[in-house]
Amino acid sequence: MNTIRRNALPILVAATAGPRDWRDGHARRHLQAAVSRPTPLRASRVLLSGLIAGASLLAGGIAAAQDYPAKTITIVVPFSAGGGVDNIARLLAEQLRTTFKQTIVIDNKPGASGMLGAQAVVKAAPDGYTLLLGSAGETAINPFVYKGRMQYAPEKDLAPITLVTRVPNVLVANPSLPVKNVEELIAYAKKNPGKLSYATSGVGNPQHLNGELFNSLAGIQMNHILYKGSAGQLVDVAGGNVDLSFVSMAGATPFIKGGRLKALAVTSAKRASFAPDIPTIAEYKPMAAYNLDNWFGLFAPAKTPADVQQKLNTAVTQALRDPGLAKKLSDQGGEPAPMTIDQFRSFIKAESVQYGRIVEAAKITPEN
C-alpha cells in the first residue's frame, strides 16, 4: 500500500498543480518521472504483452507449417531447360504435385556455374515456396574453385532438405583407343605420358574432378579439354579428336549402344543398378579409393522454418520411393537416394572434404 501511495504522489501533484506550476515544469517533471519509473503493475503488463506477442508468433509459425503448402511452389533449376538437372527437377515436381495438391513450377536460372540460380534462392523469402534443385557444383564444389568470388555461402545460406539422386558418370573412350579397361588405360597412359586427353563440360564440375582424381590415384597426367556442353564433347570423343570423357550415362548411352563409344568404367563405388555390366573404376585394386558421383539435392533458404523443411523432406522421400519415379530417374542415369535432413547435411560436409582436396591438389581455378 505504501508503494502505491509513493508512486501516486507525483501524479496527484501534477493533477492539482496550477498553470504557473505547470509552466515552471516542476509538476511535469514529476509526471514524466512517474510514467517512466517501473512499477510492479507496469512490469507485469510489459511481461504479459511480451508473452502474448511471443505466443502469437509461435502460433503463427505452427499454423504456417500446418497449412504448408498453401500456394504455388517454385523449384529453381540453376541450369538451362532440357539438361539433366532440369529433367530430374521436372520428374520430382510432377510427383510432388500429387502429394501436395498444389501447383509446382520450374524456374530455370542458368549462369555462373549454377551460382546465379542458387543465389536467387538464397535471397528468396524463407517460407518454403522457393526451393533449389541443386547439384554438387554450386552447393559444395564452387566454394573451393571460386574462392572469394561467390556471393553466398552454401553451408550458411542454404538449408539442405534431402538428397534426391546420385548420378555416377561413366568413363568412355574412342573405340580406336587400344584399351579395354581401367588397368590397360593406366598402363597405356604411363607408356605415353602427356598423350591422352579427356573432355568435360566445365571447369571444376564433377566431370573435371573425376579426371583429376583419376590422374592423382593413377599417377598419370591426362590433359583436360573443356567443352560448353556434353553433346559437343561426346561427338569429339566419338570422332577421335579427344580420347576420353567422364560424362553422364544418359548422355553416353546412345553413343555406347551405337558403337561410337566404349564404356570403360563408372565412377561410383558400386556398379550402377541401371548398368550392371559396366565395372567401377574402384574394382581395379590400385584405384580402390576412387568414388566420385555427381548428385542432386533439394535446398531451401537457410531460415525456412524447421517444420516446413521436415514436411518437404518427408514428401520428397515418399516420392522417391515410388517405383514409377525411381524408374524414370534410372532412365536419366540416376539412383534415387533420399536422406534425412541431418544425413544430407553430413553427406555434403563429407563430399566437400574430398572436393576440396582434389581442387587443391590439381590447383583448379576458374581459368583452368
Image (spheres, rainbow, N blue to C red):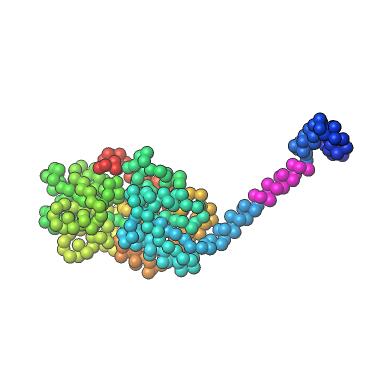
What's the residue at 72%, 47% (across, down)? 48
| Position of the C terminus by quadrant | top left
The residue stretch that appears in magenta: 41-54
Q: Quadrant of residue 94?
A: bottom left
Q: Does residue 336 appear in the picture of this structure? A: no
Residue 101, compared with residue 113, is above or below; it is below
Residue 208 within the magenta-colored segment of the rendering: no
Between residue 270 and residue 39, name the one nearer to us: 39
What's the residue at 29%, 54% (across, down)? 268
Q: Quadrant of residue 276?
A: bottom left
The answer to whether residue 84 is left or right of residue 40 is: left
Prevailing secondary structure class for the magenta stretch in the rendered image: helix
Q: Position of residue 237 (x, y in %)?
A: 17, 55
What's the residue at 50%, 52% (across, down)? 126
Between residue 121 and residue 32, name the one nearer to us: 32
| Position of the N terminus by quadrant | top right
